[in-house]
Image (spheres, rainbow, N blue to C red):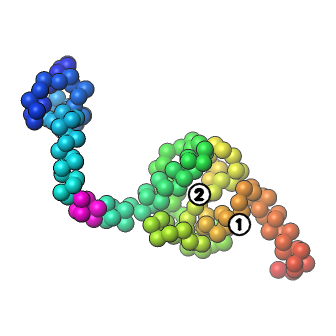
Amino acid sequence: MKTHKKCNICKKLLLINEFNKDRHSKDGHTFRCKKCNSKYLKIYNSTHKKQHNENKKIWRVKNYFKVWAWGAINSHKRRGYIFNFESNYIIELAIKTKYCSICGCELQYERFKGLKKITATIDRKTNEKILDKYDIWIICHECNAMKRSKTLVEYVEYCRMIVNKYDGGKL
């Protein structure tokens, strides 16, 4: 196995770990060293910024379930929650979940349109810090905000209490 390689740009003989990996090249590494590649990308990105931003917008529109899922997961992780499954599970669940499981409204997954009552959110059924596949569901922002930190059973009991208090159970 090679330990050194010559950069095609700066012509220096460097350690192989000074090159990024590239599965398409014969030796498995890029032809530019990391420093030269960094310089190249700065120039390229500054001259192609507009096109890059357009491509990013198009990708986000086409992949809105992924964008939503990654945003929702990162939001939970920032608050200290631990996920016992891959992000692909959330993406698959989002694709299957068209309506809020509590109120039945049609869910909106496009996160860049702002947080609305019908924006899809991840909810924890048992409100544990560690989330697994069987402890989560996707509900609308309004239902999640009303449920807050209650378990589903506590939330249903709370709703019954309100109905009984104001309607005498006639609803």
Identified at 19% across, 42% down, the residue is 39
Picture coordinates of residue 95 (x, y %)? 48, 62
Q: Would residue 148 be counted in the magenta stretch? A: no
Picture coordinates of residue 46 (x, y %)? 21, 55
Can residue 83 be seen in this snapshot? yes
Badge nearest the viewer, 2 or 1: 1
163 lies left or right of 151: right
| Residue linked to disc 2 | 122
Residue toward you, 12 or 133: 12
**Quadrant of the drawing holding the N terminus:** top left
| SS under mark 2 | strand
Identified at 61% across, 45% down, the residue is 81
Can residue 62 be seen in this snapshot? no
Q: Residues within 10 Å of mark 1 (few under 14, many from 20)?
A: few
165 lies left or right of 93: right
The number of numbered discs placed on residues in the rendered structure image is: 2
Identified at 79% across, 58% down, the residue is 154
| Residue linked to disc 1 | 146
Tell which circle, 2 or 1, labels the residue nearer the N-terminal end: 2
Residue type (three-letter) at the residue carrying disc 1: Met
**Quadrant of the drawing holding the C terminus:** bottom right
Residue range (magenta):
49-55
| SS under mark 1 | helix
Q: How much space separates mark 2 and mark 1, taking CA atoms?
A: 14 Å
Residue toward you, 128 or 47: 47
Residue type (three-letter) at the residue carrying disc 2: Ile
Picture coordinates of residue 141 (x, y %)? 61, 66
Q: Is residue 89 above or below residue 13?
A: below
Identified at 17% across, 44% down, the residue is 40
* Label placed on residue 109: none
59 lies left or right of 48: right
